[in-house]
Image (cartoon, rainbow, N blue to C red):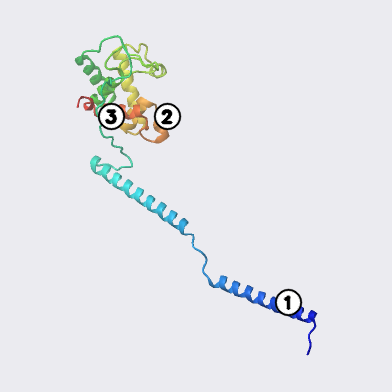
Amino acid sequence: MKMTTESLVNTALVLLGYAWLAGGCSSLQAQKGSPPAQPTAGKNAVAAQQAAVAAMQESIARQRASVEKQSGQSADTFFLLPPPAHMEGVEPGAATAECAPLPDGEVRTLAGNAATREGLDAEMLLNVMRQESGFRPCAVSPKGAMGLMQLMPSTADQLGVKDSFDPLENVDAGARFLRQLLTRYNGDVLKAVSAYNAGPARVDAVDGIPQIPETIDYINRIFYPGFEKQ
């Protein structure tokens, strides 16, 4: 039986069509049977991040346990500041003054009497006075704070101070202000003293000691008054 050229061509085309269909089906079956490629790099990145978070949580837990052990209080309510390293050439107060410091006996009497009236620790009040003004009754800071415990003009007005350079009136007002801050922070002395230095708004913003170098140094010098002599 003879086949024309046209018949041969048609037959070849049909055979090619079957071959193409067969190849496509095989490819689809292979794709269905093969598992999808795994995003190895993504998995590794997620695993590394999870490991870092776990390590950070473990470190925080160790620090919390250490603080609670040293202070005997919960780390949620107490922040223990270690005494900083000795700093050469740092004066006890930032304010400048031309007058001499008051005699030791006089400043102790001022601090003791004011502390008794307001229910404060006399040594803490004395250290605040030392840090604020260096015991100089005429000290004035670059921001305008005045006197032994460095009352700002607005604070002095609120406390009814008539003469911020009068030692008795100034220390009495400063002690009353500290008492107000202790009441505001439910007896938390670190927050109260931080607010005396940095202002209540900054303490409220972080619910604790503001991480301001000046304030941290201030706290350390008041609660570790001998560190600069080491």
Question: 79 above or below 156?
Answer: below
Question: 89 above or below 59?
Answer: above
Dot 1 amino acid type: Leu
Mark number for residue 220? 3
Mark number for residue 13? 1
User: How far across and how far down the image is residue 200, in percent?
Assistant: 40, 28
> Marks 2 and 1, Cα distance to the nearest angstrom?
87 Å
Observer-nearest residue: 41 or 49? 41
Q: Which residue is mark 2?
A: 201
Q: Secondary structure at mark 1?
A: helix
Mark 3 Cα-neighbour bin, 10 Å: few <14, some 14–19, many ≥20: some
> Marks 2 and 3, Cα distance to the nearest angstrom?
21 Å
Mark 1 Cα-neighbour bin, 10 Å: few <14, some 14–19, many ≥20: few
- Mark 3–mark 1 contact, CB under 8 Å? no
Residue positioned 20% across, 24% down in the render: 229
Question: 14 above or below 114?
Answer: below
Residue positioned 23% across, 25% down in the render: 228
Dot 2 amino acid type: Ala
Is tag 2's residue or tag 1's residue first in the polypeptide sequence? 1
Observer-nearest residue: 141 or 229? 229
Dot 3 amino acid type: Asn
Residue positioned 33% across, 16% down in the render: 95
Q: Which is closer to the viewer, label 2 or label 1?
A: 1
User: How far across and how far down the image is residue 87, in percent?
Assistant: 26, 25
The reply, left or right, for residue 223 in relation to residue 47 is left
Is tag 3's residue or tag 1's residue first in the polypeptide sequence? 1
Q: Quadrant of the N terminus?
A: bottom right
The residue furthest top is 99
The reply, left or right, for residue 84 in relation to residue 153 is left
The reply, left or right, for residue 214 in relation to residue 82 is right
Labels in figure, total: 3
